[in-house]
Amino acid sequence: MITKSVFDTNVLISATLWDNSVAQKFLFKCIKENIQIFSSQEIIEEYKEILARDFDYKEQEIGEILEKVFQFVILVNPSKKVDIVKEDTDDNKIIECAIESGAEYIISYDKHLLKLKEFQRIKIVRPEEALGL
């Protein structure tokens, strides 16, 4: 059973923008079952940037989304940098957040992270897999 997780930015986007997406169903499961969701300022900044750039959200709209969703998220400030994902070093912030928070799972659609499958006993799975846990 999952008790602590980190959502990759792509899962956060899917969970907050697409009703009834698997990512959103997993987000609701986390809220309902008190599964802790961790994030970092770096992940939030990337999330805000994608909402503005790719989906044309305005600052006020982004603020409203952050208020709704991130009330269920615990922020951590990763103290350790890693260089595990060589193909896309930007993905390392997800692993750093998981290490800092003691998360058991990283929930992601990212091929570079999923390819790892596990790192320091942190399992890396798609939302579809996580729903069954």
Image (cartoon, rainbow, N blue to C red):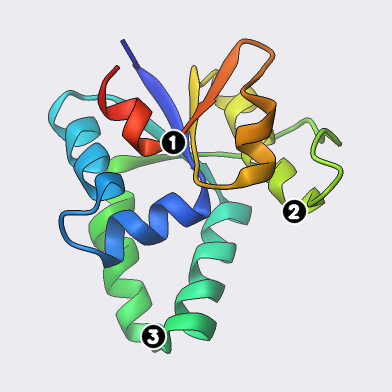
Q: Residue at x 19, y 35 (%)?
A: 31
Q: Position of residue 84 (x, y in %)?
A: 82, 33
Q: Amino acid at mark 2?
A: Asp
Mark 3–mark 1 Cα distance, whole angstroms, equals: 26 Å
Q: Are marks 2 and 3 in contact (CB under 8 Å)?
A: no
Work out whether 84 lies above or below 56: above
Work out whether 63 lies above or below 53: above
Q: Which corner quadrant holds the N terminus?
A: top left
Residue indicated by mark 2? 90
Observer-nearest of 38 and 109: 109
Q: Is residue 45 left or right of residue 60?
A: right
Mark 3 residue crowding within 10 angstroms, few (<14) / some (14–19) / many (20+): some
Q: Does residue 21 appear in this view?
A: yes
Q: Are marks 3 and 1 in contact (CB under 8 Å)?
A: no
Q: Does residue 36 appear in this view?
A: no
Mark 1 residue crowding within 10 angstroms, few (<14) / some (14–19) / many (20+): many
Mark 2 residue crowding within 10 angstroms, few (<14) / some (14–19) / many (20+): few
Tell me the SS state at disc 3.
loop
Mark 2–mark 1 Cα distance, whole angstroms, equals: 18 Å
Q: Amino acid at mark 3?
A: Tyr
Residue indicated by mark 3? 57
Mark positioned earlier in the residue sequence (2 or 3): 3
Q: Position of residue 93 (x, y in %)?
A: 69, 44
Q: Amino acid at mark 1?
A: Arg
Q: Position of residue 18 (x, y in %)?
A: 25, 64
Residue indicated by mark 1? 126
Q: Quadrant of residue 45?
A: bottom right
Q: Which corner quadrant holds the C terminus?
A: top left
Q: Residue at x 65, y 38 (%)?
A: 113
Mark positioned earlier in the residue sequence (2 or 1): 2
